[in-house]
């Protein structure tokens, strides 16, 4: 019984060390990739999205009425006439 407990603890310790080693490798890889990303991509300032949304919403939207859905009119628009 003592031997089983010893084997079990060795097994869990080896799994722990393998996992810990893998985590350290992945953390190092993430740091390396973040550094490469910083080199390729200069810091950008965010564009003012709020102003653009307000400008778009202030323009009236064009709504076609049912009488304007004439097929001949659609064909002339497609042909550029």
Image (cartoon, rainbow, N blue to C red):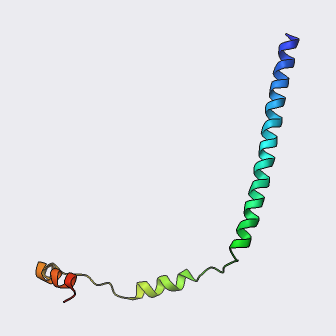
Residue 76 appears left or right of 62: left
Of all residues, the one furthest to the top in this rendering is: 1
Q: Quadrant of residue 66?
A: bottom left
Residue nearer the viewer, 51 or 70: 70
Question: In the image, residue 12 lies at what x, y percent?
Answer: 80, 28
Could you tell me how many numbered marks the image carries?
A: 0
Residue 15 appears left or right of 48: right
* Residue appearing at x 53%, y 86% in the figure: 51
Q: Quadrant of residue 20?
A: top right
The C terminus is located in which quarter? Answer: bottom left
* Residue appearing at x 43%, y 85% in the figure: 56
* Residue appearing at x 76%, y 54% in the figure: 29
Question: In the image, residue 39 lies at what x, y percent?
Answer: 74, 72
The N terminus is located in which quarter? Answer: top right
61 shown above or below 39: below
Q: Quadrant of residue 64?
A: bottom left
Question: In the image, residue 48 lies at what x, y percent?
Answer: 58, 83
* Residue appearing at x 62%, y 79% in the figure: 46
Residue 22 appears left or right of 57: right
29 shown above or below 61: above
Residue 33 appears left or right of 75: right
């Amino acid at each position: 019984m003592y031997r089983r407990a010893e084997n079990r603890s060795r097994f869990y310790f080896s799994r722990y060390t393998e996992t810990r080693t893998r985590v350290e490798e992945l953390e190092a890889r993430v740091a390396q990739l973040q550094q490469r990303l910083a080199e390729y991509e200069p810091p950008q300032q965010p564009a003012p999205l709020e102003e653009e949304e307000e400008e778009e919403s202030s323009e009236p939207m064009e709504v076609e009425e049912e009488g304007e859905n004439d097929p001949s009119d659609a064909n002339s628009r497609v042909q550029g006439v």
